[in-house]
């Protein structure tokens, strides 16, 4: 008797509904997974994902980080997430000082204020953790830092949500997604032009003033398209991720009420709990790279010029790296293996410290607001997106 | 032959993970500049320094033999 071989189809309902069992089977049966249907490879074991993330000379970001972008003949938008060194370093260094653990402390009051404001408006009987809370607040923080005027900050979130969503079985943008993507691009382009005329104390204005090395050994400034792309990336990265992390965590804690109770009684466990939330069910499941040269592992050779999925969420559940990898334990020994939740190496999450701060504050307030709660399981709704996973709706009732 | 800690300052983004692991070697000042207080990898410190190398999210720290 032979078992049917494992199938990883990143656009299928089976995958969206339960990725983790598929990951375990890929790790055991096909550590270098190949999809004949979509012609891509995927790495799932912790050691392989970590090594590939560090090896940007083999696994390049320059063609994009999702499958449809890598496939596209059009070439990618100029954005740090789609660059290799040295360009990546020049551009990332224009913004990274604003995101260090020390620097993001200046956002603490803003975050606390927003978190309290959104929580004060919800009905404890019918509270949708994502739609009412973890969706709207993070986008306000990052777009405020970037320089998006207040009246457009929630609009940014709608654009991102629409442009990331996929129809089951579909790889590319939906029609609505394409329209949202164009609308947001035009908005940022106009905003860049406005700030060029009237600089403010925000990131867009600092990007306009910045100079980066050019190809001829001199320096140049960024054009409005580059600035629009940069701002759009920051908005997307800062809006979608904490939203999903907090939503998924509320679901996970509902299944592990003893862990919620432990955290409620000892808030000093919060930083460790956030790391475990990221490991156990973090928002970013994979990023796709493009091989610039061939790579051989586990007896399989990946040719040059192929998309390779680096499955961080699988790595974070790899029993080869973590003891009881499938167990949610907020007091887990964190030195056992590197948490891949924020990536690793040159493209590791720029906003990690901000995401941690937002999540710690949000969870701390939720522990007070809903010391005991139940998830309305039939109202739970997963997102269908590429690269990221989580929920659109997590309805709870505070007990 | 001695082993030394080397930081690639082009990669470092002041995440302070290394300082959390072994503050007698790594120190971030209030301007987010990383200073290596003592770059010698002594046998007593080696394990923690290797932990800092591994946990640096930017992979900016290395150990070289001179």
Image (cartoon, grey):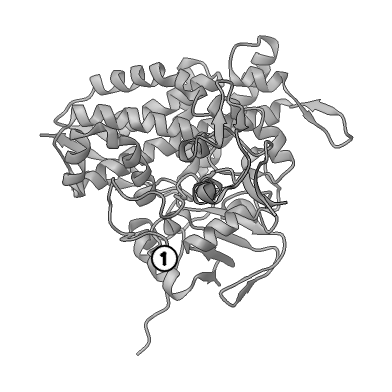
In the image shown, does B29 or A168 lie closer to the viewer?
B29
In the image shown, does B34 or A244 lie closer to the viewer?
B34
In the image shown, does A146 or A189 lie closer to the viewer?
A146
Residue B46, position as x, y percentages in the image: 54, 50
Q: Mark 1 points at which residue?
A: A320
Q: Residue at x 48, y 63 (%)?
A: A44
Q: Which residue is drawn at 37% across and 43% down?
A: A275
Residue A146, position as x, y percentages in the image: 55, 22
Displayed quadrant of residue A372: top left
Q: Is residue A14 above or below residue A184?
A: below
Answer whether residue A130 is visible to the viewer in this image.
yes
- Name the side, left or right, on which A172 lies relative to A108: right
Chain of residue at mark 1: A
Q: Residue furthest right?
A: A216
Q: Which residue is drawn at 66% across and 28% down?
A: A94
Number of on-image labels: 1
- Name the side, left or right, on which A315 lies relative to A328: right
Residue A237, position as x, y percentages in the image: 51, 36
Residue A118, position as x, y percentages in the image: 30, 22
Q: In which quarter of the image is the N terminus of chain A?
A: bottom left
Q: Residue furthest top?
A: A198
Instruction: Count neighbours of disc 1 (C-alpha within 10 A) and say few if under 14, some if 14 to 19, many if 20 or more.
Output: some
Q: Is residue A347 above or below residue A142?
A: below
Q: Residue furthest bottom?
A: A1
Q: In this view, does A325 lie above or below A200?
A: below
Q: Residue at x 47, y 32 (%)?
A: A353
Assign a secondary structure to mark 1.
loop
In the image shown, does A261 or A24 lie closer to the viewer?
A261
- Name the side, left or right, on which A116 lies relative to A167: left
Q: Quadrant of the C terminus of chain A?
A: top left
Answer whether residue A78 is visible to the viewer in this image.
no
Displayed quadrant of residue B1: bottom right
């Amino acid at each position: 008797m032979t078992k049917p071989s494992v199938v990883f189809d990143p656009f299928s309902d089976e995958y969206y509904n339960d990725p983790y069992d598929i990951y375990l089977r890929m790790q055991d049966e096909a550590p270098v997974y190949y999809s004949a249907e979509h012609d891509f490879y995927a790495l799932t074991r912790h050691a392989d994902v970590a090594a590939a993330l560090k090896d940007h000379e083999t696994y390049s970001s320059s063609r994009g980080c999702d499958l449809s972008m890598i496939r596209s003949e059009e070439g990618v938008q100029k954005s740090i997430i789609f660059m290799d060194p040295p360009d990546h370093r020049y551009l990332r260094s224009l913004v990274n000082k604003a995101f260090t653990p020390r620097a993001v402390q200046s956002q603490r009051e803003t975050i606390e204020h927003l978190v309290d404001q959104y929580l004060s408006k919800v009905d404890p009987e019918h509270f949708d953790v994502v739609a009412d809370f973890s969706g709207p607040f993070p986008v306000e923080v990052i777009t405020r830092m970037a320089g998006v005027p207040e009246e457009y900050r929630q609009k940014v979130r709608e654009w991102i949500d629409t442009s990331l969503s996929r129809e089951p079985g579909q790889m590319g943008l939906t029609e609505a997604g394409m329209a949202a993507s164009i609308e947001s691009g035009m908005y940022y382009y106009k905003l860049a032009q406005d700030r060029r005329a009237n600089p403010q104390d925000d990131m867009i204005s600092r990007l306009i003033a910045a100079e980066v090395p050019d190809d001829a050994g001199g320096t140049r400034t960024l054009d409005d398209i580059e600035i629009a792309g940069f701002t759009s990336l920051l908005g997307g990265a800062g809006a979608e991720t904490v939203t999903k992390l907090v939503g998924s965590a509320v679901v996970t804690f509902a299944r592990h009420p003893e862990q919620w109770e432990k955290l409620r009684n000892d808030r000093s466990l919060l930083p460790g709990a956030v790391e475990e939330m990221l490991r156990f069910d973090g928002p970013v499941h994979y990023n796709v790279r493009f091989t610039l040269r061939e790579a051989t592992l586990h007896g399989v050779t990946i040719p040059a010029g192929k998309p390779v999925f680096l499955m961080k969420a699988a790595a974070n559940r790899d029993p080869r790296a973590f003891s009881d990898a499938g167990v949610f334990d907020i007091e887990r020994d964190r030195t056992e293996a590197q948490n891949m939740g924020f990536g690793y190496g040159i493209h590791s999450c720029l906003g990690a410290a901000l995401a941690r701060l937002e999540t710690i504050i949000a969870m701390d307030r939720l522990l007070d607001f809903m010391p005991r709660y139940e998830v309305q399981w039939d109202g739970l709704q997963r997102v269908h997106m590429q690269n990221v996973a989580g929920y659109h709706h997590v309805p709870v009732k505070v007990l | 032959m001695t082993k030394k800690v080397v930081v690639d300052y082009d990669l470092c983004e002041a995440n302070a993970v290394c300082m959390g692991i072994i503050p007698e070697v790594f120190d971030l000042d209030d301007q987010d500049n990383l200073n290596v207080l003592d770059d010698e990898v002594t046998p007593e410190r080696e394990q923690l320094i290797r932990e800092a190398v591994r946990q640096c999210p930017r992979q900016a720290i290395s150990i070289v033999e001179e």
